[in-house]
Image: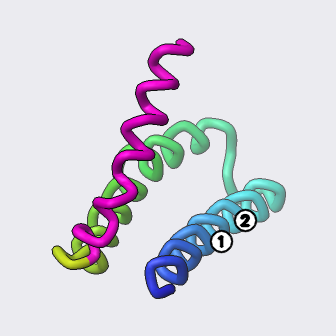
Amino acid sequence: MSALLTSISSVVEIIFVIALGFFLRNGGKFHDSFKHDIEFLIMKVALPLNIFVGVLDNLTRSKLLSLSGSLIFVIISFAVGYLVA
């Protein structure tokens, strides 16, 4: 249950940042040239770092071992996706 709450809180943070950018853009605080710079910063720097820190803080060896039983479904879905593509 704590993993679900952590996932939801991470998504909510991202949604707040998107909403803030939307309202600032509509308010005229950001111009079109700023869009590409902030997009690069968020998608290439901030989001990967947020995911990395979240994994370091929340993923333990016991949690990883408890998730390994479901790994077969991930492997099957990748194989099916590969075959379909």
Q: Please say if the residues under marks 1 and 2 sit with CB atoms less than 8 Å apart.
A: yes
**Amino acid bearing label 2:** Ala
10 Å neighbourhood of mark 2: few (<14), some, or many (≥20)?
few
The location of residue 25, given as percent across then percent down, is: 75, 55
What residue appears at the point 38 percent right and 44 percent down from the top-left corner?
Answer: 44
**Amino acid bearing label 1:** Phe
Up/down of 24 relative to 33, above or below: below
The boundaries of the magenta stretch are 63-85
Mark carried by residue 16: 1
Q: Toward the viewer: 85 or 45?
A: 85
Q: Toward the viewer: 79 or 4?
A: 79
Say which residue label 2 marks: 19
What residue appears at the point 66 percent right and 66 percent down from the top-left corner?
Answer: 15
The location of residue 59, given as percent across then percent down, is: 27, 74
Identify the secondary structure beneath mark 2.
Answer: helix
10 Å neighbourhood of mark 1: few (<14), some, or many (≥20)?
few
The location of residue 81, given as percent across then percent down, is: 51, 24
Up/down of 57 relative to 76, above or below: below
* Left or right of 38 on screen, residue 28: right
* Left or right of 72 on screen, residue 34: right
What residue appears at the point 21 percent right and 78 percent down from the top-left corner?
Answer: 62
What residue appears at the point 16 percent right and 74 percent down from the top-left corner?
Answer: 61
Name the chief secondary structure element in magenta. Answer: helix
Identify the secondary structure beneath mark 1.
Answer: helix
Residue 58 in magenta stretch: no
Up/down of 36 relative to 5, above or below: above
Colouring of the image: rainbow
Q: Toward the viewer: 55 or 3?
A: 3
Mark carried by residue 41: none
